[in-house]
Amino acid sequence: MGRLAAAGRPFGPIRPSDIITPTMWTKMMGGPRKKAPKTIAVIDPDACFGAFACSICQAACPVAGCIVEEPDRDGRMVCAVRADLCIGCGLCVTLGNPTAPQQREFGCPADYDAINMVPFEDVVKLLQEPQSGDATRQA
């Protein structure tokens, strides 16, 4: 009594190799996502405190390389989400933000609230629009 079946061995003693240790999935998602998410995170560079001063969103993100540092229009380094990598989990979003899809322990600081979840299709449309000043030169 009190003995458990372990690793295909009925009622034998449990060995350390029989115990399945859950692996932390943070930063483990390096491959391509399986399908396009419904929403993805979008960071407002004017509200972002700065990539080198905060980076909480980067720590919260489970996808390696999804949230990167890049200069804003003033040259200040802020965080930006790569639309091609975001899986839409919302772990980076501020606690209490109405666009957050789930409860979590931390995210973007509430006094900055720089991240919102936006429909993926809307982001794709914005990224495909030509930006002002990006006109191609013809010789």
Image (spheres, grey):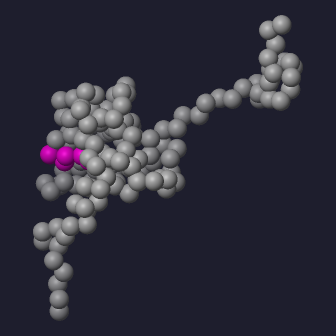
Q: Residue furthest top?
A: 1
Q: Is residue 75 visible?
A: yes
Q: Main secondary structure of the magenta part?
A: loop
Is 92 a magenta residue?
no
Q: Quadrant of the N terminus?
A: top right
Q: Is residue 34 above or below residue 106?
A: below
Task: Please provide percent x and percent y for residue 44.
Answer: 19, 46
Name the quarter where the C terminus is drawn.
bottom left
When asked about the image quadrant of residue 11, the answer is top right
In the picture, measured across the screen, residue 74 lies left or right of residue 89, that is left
**Residue 31 on image: x %, y %:** 52, 54
* Residue 55, quarter of picture: top left
The picture places residue 47, in percent across and down from the top left corner, at 16, 41
Residue 38, position in %: x, y? 35, 48
Q: Quadrant of residue 3?
A: top right
Residue closest to the far bottom:
139
Name the residue at 12% across, 71% down.
133
What residue is rendered at 32% in x and 46% in y? 39
7 in relation to 117, above or below: above
Whether residue 79 is visible here, answered yes or no, is: no
Query: Looking at the image, how many numbered discs can be counted on the residues?
Result: 0
Residue at 31 percent across and 32 percent down: it is 107
Locate residue 20 relative to residue 59 in the image: left or right: right
Q: Residue at x 36, y 36 (%)?
A: 91
Provide the residue span drawn in magenta: 42-46
